[in-house]
Amino acid sequence: MSNVRHQNAQYSRSHALRDRPRIFISHASSDTWVARQIEAQVRACGADTFLDCEHIEHGDDFEDKIISAASDCTELVVLFTPTAKDRKYVWMEIGMFLGARKRIVGVLYGVRKHEIATDQFTPVALKRLDCVDLNDVETYFGEVSRRCASWGVQHG
Amino acid sequence: MPPGGFNMADVFISSSVEDRLRVTAITKELEALGVTVWKDQDIRAGENWVETMDTALRDAKVMVLCITPRFLASDWCRMEIGVALSRAKAGEGRMMPVLLSDAPHSSLLERFQTLDARELPAQAIAANIKRALEADA
């Protein structure tokens, strides 16, 4: 029960500071084009986004920006690819959202759900995440649209 | 497991499996000081990792990260760094990096006061962790 209260407190804190959901898109640099397509669709649903290549400028403190954005965003989308599994910031970003008990959705591209489920090196926590194949990502956009509507946001 | 099951531990220790001998020694010293400890190595094997980590890591007053090259190279440990960061950022616990051996530069962890424990015995490391715990009491 205390965890539920904690989760609600975290959610309320993020919620109180924003007028719409803000979605952190975690990806490997080699998957940037795909990540940008997801970002465009999420924004069209009415949500704000954080994509490191878009929102971090030369000279910025990269890690500070990541930490602040994770704190500010209401949910995380992980573009889970074979490359992303080897990117250290992807794992740290997952941990930050797990720690804050915020929603995490995996978008699988080049990785199958059963491969994650059976990979002995993938933490159990990730095996339990909501995952959607990139080919079915429209279902996730539909969920984002509904969440935006619940915040009173018109479609972007 | 600390007394009372999952309810509360003072300290959560995140470490690489390969560093288990030194971590076990630190844990024993902490327990001798009356500090309850959760080691992530104890819970990774279980299917209830999420629930257990939720309780153990969230409720811990001090989150100790045992920094070694193997720790920084581990996906799992990176994820736990993220959990600890989010809690520290929210003011819900103290994140305490403990440098156990020479490790690659990490600007991320430099943001936090790091205990240089490369030459320290387990007893001294435990005493430092207990001091950090008491500082937040």
Image (spheres, coloured by chain):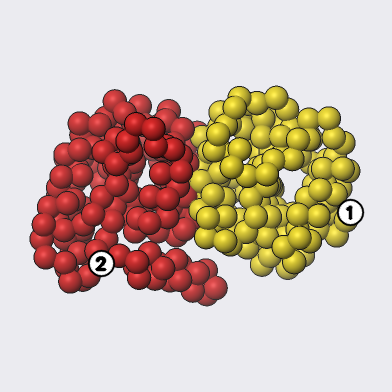
Q: Is residue A118 visible?
A: no
Mark identifier at residue A4: none
Residue B137 left/right relative to A31: right
Residue B67 lies, in percent from the top left, at 66, 34
Q: Residues within 10 Å of mark 2 (few under 14, many from 20)?
A: some
Name the residue carrying label 1. Answer: B32
Q: Nearer the viewer, mark 1 or mark 2?
A: 2
Q: Is residue A41 visible?
A: yes
Q: Residues within 10 Å of mark 1 (few under 14, many from 20)?
A: few
The red-coloured chain is labelled: A
> In this orientation, which residue lies closer to the viewer: B132 or B42?
B132
Residue at (59, 42) in percent of width and height = B111
Question: Circle 2 — which element?
Answer: loop
> In this orientation, which residue lies closer to the viewer: A145 or B105?
B105
Residue A19 lies, in percent from the top left, at 25, 67
Q: Given the image, what chain letter belongs to the residue carrying mark 1? A: B
Residue B133 lies, in percent from the top left, at 75, 58
Q: Quadrant of the N terminus of chain B?
A: bottom right
Mark identifier at residue A19: 2
Residue at (31, 28) in percent of width and height = A29
Q: Given the image, what chain letter belongs to the residue carrying mark 2? A: A
Q: In the rendered view, tell whether residue A43 sits above or below residue A146.
A: above
Q: Quadrant of the C terminus of chain B?
A: bottom right
Question: Circle 1 — which element?
Answer: helix
Give the residue type that dot 2 points to.
Answer: Asp
Give the residue type that dot 1 points to.
Answer: Ala
| Res B34 → quadrant | bottom right
> In this orientation, which residue lies closer to the viewer: A18 or A147?
A18
The yellow-coloured chain is labelled: B
